Image (cartoon, helix red, strand yellow):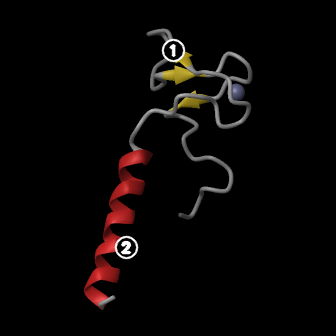
Amino acid sequence: MSWEQLRSIVLQDKADREFWAGQPPRACPNDGTPLIPAPPSASGVELFCPHDGFSWPRDRALPGEAGG
Ligand SMILES: [Zn+2]
């Protein structure tokens, strides 16, 4: 394996992470409850968890993911 191949893998991984970071989650990361569309009155929120109030993308910065 060459350095160029390693570099390619790293760049692809970075691109994949950025892609998935931009995708809406399907379920609450806290309790796994399926997220439902937020009402239009909730500005800045597209999806939310009816169980604990997790809102996406407002609460996108999850514990343990900061600084990444
Ligand atoms: Zn939740």
Q: Amino acid at mark 1?
A: Ala
Q: Quadrant of ligand 1?
A: top right
Nearer-the-camera pick, 52 or 34: 34
Q: Secondary structure at mark 2?
A: helix
Q: Secondary structure at mark 1?
A: loop
Quarter location, residue 31: top right
| Mark 1 Cα-neighbour bin, 10 Å: few <14, some 14–19, many ≥20 | some
Nearer-the-camera pick, 17 or 8: 8
The relative height of residue 62 versus residue 49 in the rendered view (above or below) is: below
Quarter location, residue 59: top right
Q: Residue at x 51, y 33 (%)?
A: 25
Residues at marks 2 and 1, CA–CA distance in whole angstroms? 36 Å
Q: Residue at x 33, y 88 (%)?
A: 1
Say whether residue 2 is left or right of residue 20: left
Nearer-the-camera pick, 43 or 28: 28
Location of residue 12 in the rendering, given as x and y in whole percent from the top left corner: 32, 65
Q: Which mark is residue 14?
A: none
Q: Which mark is residue 10?
A: 2
Nearer-the-camera pick, 34 or 62: 34
Say whether residue 6 is left or right of residue 64: left
Q: Which mark is residue 38?
A: 1
The relative height of residue 67 versus residue 6 in the rendered view (above or below) is: above
Location of residue 45 in the rendering, given as x and y in whole percent from the top left corner: 49, 24
